[in-house]
Image: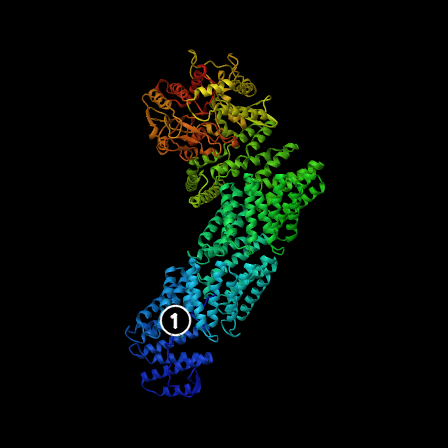
Amino acid sequence: MKFSVGVSPSPIYNATKNIVNGSRTNGEIIASRERLESDYVEVQRLENRNIRAQELNKIGCAYNKLYQQSLESADLERAIAIHEEAKRYTSLSDPLFAKCSNDLGLGLKTRFGLTMNRMDIDRAVTICEKTVEITNDNDPKLLNWLHTLGHCYMARISQFGGEDDQNQAISIWKRMVKLARDDDPNKHAFMGNLGISLHTRFEQSGSLSDLSEAILTFRDAVNLLSAGHVAKPSLMKALGVTLHSRFTRHGDLKDLEEALSCQQAAVDLTSNGHPDKADILTNLGNSLLSRFEHFRSISDLNTAISHFQAANITPDNGPKRPDHIGNLGNAILLRFKHLGSVEDLKYAISLYQLAVDLTPNGHLDKPALIINLGKSIRLRFKRLGDVQDLDNAISIDQEAANLMPDHHPLRLHAHPEKLALMVNLAISTQVRFEYFGDLKDLDQAILFGQAAADRMPDGHPQRAYNSNNLGVSNRLRFERLGDIKDLEKAISLFQVAVDSTPDGHPDKPRCLCNLGVSFTARFGRLGDVQDLENGISFVEAAVGSMPDSHPEKPGQLSELGYAIELRFKRLGNSEDLEKAILLKQAAVDRMPDSHHFKPNLLNNLGSSMQSRFEHLGDIEDLKKAVSFFQAAVDLTPDDQRDKSFSLSNLGNSCELLFQKRGDVNDLERAISFKRAAVNLTPNGHFDKPRWLGNLGNAFSLRFRETSELSDLKNALSSLSTAATSPTGPSTIRFEAACQWADISYRLNQPPIAAFDCAINLLPQLAWLGMSLRDQHIQIARAGSLVRYAVAVAIELQEYETAVQWAEYGRSIVWQNLLSLRSPLDELRKSHSKLAMRLQDISQQLEMSLSYPNLPDKKTLVPLLEAANKASALAAERDKIIEQIRTLPGFEHFFKARTFDKLAPAAYEGPVAIINTYDFRSDALILIPHDSQTPTVSVVHIPLESFSNNMSISMFHDFTRLLSSAGVRARDSRKSERTSCVSNGGDSFKNILSHLWLHVVKPILEGLAYQVSLPIYWSHSLPGDNTRIWWCATGMLAFLPIHAAGNYDSDAIGEKISDYVVSSYTPTLTAIIDQSQPSMTMDSQILTIAQPSTPGATPLPETENEVQKVKDIATGIRVKQLINGEATAARVLQAMKESNWIHLACHGMQDNKEPLKSGFLLHDKTLELSELIREPLPKTDFAFLSACQTATGDVKITEESVHLAAGMLFSGCRGVIGTMWSIQDEDAPKVTEAVYRWMLKDGMPNRKEAARALHEAVRELRESGTNFLSWVPFIHMGR
């Protein structure tokens, strides 16, 4: 909208009045050219230079007056020439010099307004500056000279801008206001000019102090004038405009109401025939539009339109008529946006076209008018979908740019209209991308939008609008290419748009909706349910603040329905699904078929109906889904890229129809639609893997029906292409790889490449840019696939591949985190800068990872910023790693370890990987061979009598047994446990017996192990017992393999402990020896005891337990933290300073959020999420004498998410933990026995921990205690 801010000052410049023989204008006689030339000849005869100069200057002023009447450029040229001549007859010391210079400057300024010749205005400024410089402040004529100089500056500013000129003009007006007496009849004009300049500088810089000063200046000027003063309406108009500007910036309704009052008063004070009436009506109309946008009162909009129509009474040849027509077009266009009438849109376009046609080429306002025309035509394209409109809109924007010469103000660095042009070009090219899918258009849109953003200062009125549009472009590029950095950028931009847009502003709902949609998109990529909740919250806010009649309301209703349906799919609440359907149906009902967005709404509604069919099984829902998808396809032109989305949806629903009713025609239609979706989507498109995966599944389904080999070939081709695509969501590519692998195996096709592809996608599935919780959520689906792959590799006798896959698929999140702490010594030697960059960004990423509670409103923004930062850091880290892999010798940098790099895990003893799956169970044993060069081989031992179903059944029995025994917290309730065990002891024996018969005994027999003599026998030495490490998968990972045996028999050789000393390891990597400071007599043991934790059951024996450690560790420094000393902060700090750690306290495993498992200390729970953030560089060994420190989470069986594994991750080489709660009186016994073995002969030896625990548990077991007491103690690591 264009506002007129000008002030009509009282005349200061007065020409000579003693001119005769001419015409009259407004009662003043204007001399003819003939008389002026005759006078000029007479003046040439004068010999006195001063008199000649004075008379010549009078003639020049008379020619200037004649030009104002005739508008003949020859008169102006003659005036300038005569003023030049008059000035030559004067000198700096001559009092006439200032007058002649001032009048010459006025002439040059006038000619500049015609020719835009920079030399004229520059010379005018120079001449007038000199005039002011030589004039004393007491000279009454100084105000005249300052007035001329100020207007020269303003003329130069209007065309070329310039901060210095703007500041100089303001300085001049302030000087004039200060010099003028209060009774000066022109003081109001000086103040008006000052107000205009301050307002102009505000528009350029966004300085609120300038705007406030302009308002105060205009108020003072208005107050100087009486009610009937001729200049009062003009100043009231100016005051209204500046108040409106402040309302636009701050949203204070008081400013808007005062602006309306001022502008209405200006209208009332101005007669209908007055030349300023149209401007004043226009300004009043614009303020009414602002009030309409705030309150949505249609009467305000219609009243504004009537004012704009009244303003158009200006004659056709009036210079401001195009502006007034353009303002009417703005109002009509706003009514279209509010009511959706296409007739209003067409009328607005016709008005804009008329305004452009009435504006001559070269006019400064023409580019801005063309911009508005292009914007309205682009809106018609969005509404009606005519591609010609889109091309015309872009051409029009480019025409506007071409019409700007280099000196045009729109070429200035931050001129508002130039920025508007850049924003419009960004939007038009973005819309063209949305229609045709050409990435060049999207890149161009981002280029234009970013260029505009870079030139906008904080507080710029278009900052929010551009941030919103630029955010959309970045989100579209994310949807196309899948780069998470684009989505993070979009979220950041939308947040800026939301924060910069006041509540009640008409653009606020759009900004809120886009922010919400982007959070929903990030949920789809990373799986963080908090992103989904944020997305729903923002879109709900958008829907709630948008009027029902707004044409964008249907789209927002559909977006809200989409997000709520996602929540249904994630959390399973049927009410969410019903709400989603109602919202999407309302969106479809409100949108006319002619609208180009209608297919999207139909697709969304169809998806919800299909979801309800899948949930409830009603085929009528599925039939409705098919009809909605078909309607979407029918309404979408073939050359629109969204058609592939509609086609794929239609294909999926037809496939479901086939599966429901068995009609092969439905399947044929499904394949046809899905193939069309693939063919319409260019290679490299983010969605192409999804369409390919859908098509592959349909071919596979038809192959099972027809056995046509071509269908099998097409299925494998589609799925493999989807799985190996460089773009697309990792979840989609992983699912395609799983389907590819499954079909290949089941149909006797080579499956290794497919399984390898799926397993190599696991780190992307649990991407480092996600929070730890979300990594675990994403990886939960992977455990079954890994065990399937390992089973297939074993069946094909690819044992080393099976070992590699078993390793890659376990503890993925731990391995991700370990990669952040990996030493970079080799890289640092040859590429130190890259190593420093990688180390720095890895450290930042590790610090940014968190596992927070669901945030409240106060913490939401910081948590969002943290999540955005983590994603951006992870993306940057990925790029650095890819760069490193291009370097010679670093091709495998940070890639998964091959078998030869995993083999050292078995150098100190066999490692048994036990894999269970639906069709087979096996053990792969890594066996070391003694030689000068250590080697490792893989022994395969099939577990023919064991099955995956058996492991699941045993796990459930075991869980019920522990629940009935109440072993969920360390306490002293021995009598209760004894009662439980006496009733369930047989069940415990049965579980241990099954583990012995079906798992452990076959492995020991396969290894030809013999019974080992107990260490306490006098002829046996420490170290004689064979070590073995267990690495179990699936539900077997939660069962006590180390205690397997036939406990109904007293015979030696019927229990695992008769043969081996058992340890566990979450992965092979965890037990590959790494450098660690050796334990010496100067080292420190940290003991923590909590005999009376606030809010928990007392544990009186814990203090006795840690005292035993101190008594045994003679000669070694022992640091004790007991009760109130053991705060979380002190414990963490002491851990980092200690070599061995002993915790005797309550512990707990959180079954809902495993990373919230922790140790109950004096002030709070020290959670696993906190522990893993703190590397323990000195710690070699930890004894976790607390309950449930090695329990884990059944939802993520392969991840080992428990306290013992967390200690291994943080740096411990060996850990003693518990699978369930232990009894308070048992812990000191085990502790004493363990430390006596580990500190034998006074020398600490961490590698004796497993044997020490083996003997300590044997002593406890042989003392007659029950299974619940001795079985939970386990050793992990080295």
List x then y, in percent, for residue 1141.
38, 27
Is residue 641 visible to the viewer in this orientation of the structure? no
**Compared with residue 958, is residue 220 higher up or lower down, i.e. above or below?**
below
Quadrant in which the C terminus appears: top left
In this rendering, position of residue 626 left or right of residue 223: right
| Count of all numbered marks drawn on residues in the image | 1
In this rendering, position of residue 1106 left or right of residue 643: left
In this rendering, position of residue 475 left or right of residue 832: right
Which residue is located at x 33 percent, y 30 percent?
Answer: 1124
List x then y, in percent, for residue 345.
57, 62
**Compared with residue 788, is residue 386 higher up or lower down, i.e. above or below?**
below
Is residue 22 visible to the viewer in this orientation of the structure? yes
SS type, badge 1: helix
List x then y, in percent, for residue 277.
47, 72
Judging by the rendered image, the residue that carries numbered circle 1 is: 151
Which is nearer the eye, 858 or 466? Answer: 858
Few, some or many C-alpha atoms within 10 Å of disc 1 (few <14, some 14-19, many ≥20)? Answer: some
List x then y, in percent, for residue 183.
32, 74
Q: How is the image coloured?
A: rainbow
Find residue 336 and report its image quarter.
Answer: bottom right
Q: Amino acid at mark 1?
A: His
Find residue 1018 and report its image quarter.
Answer: top left
Which is nearer the eye, 763 or 823? Answer: 763
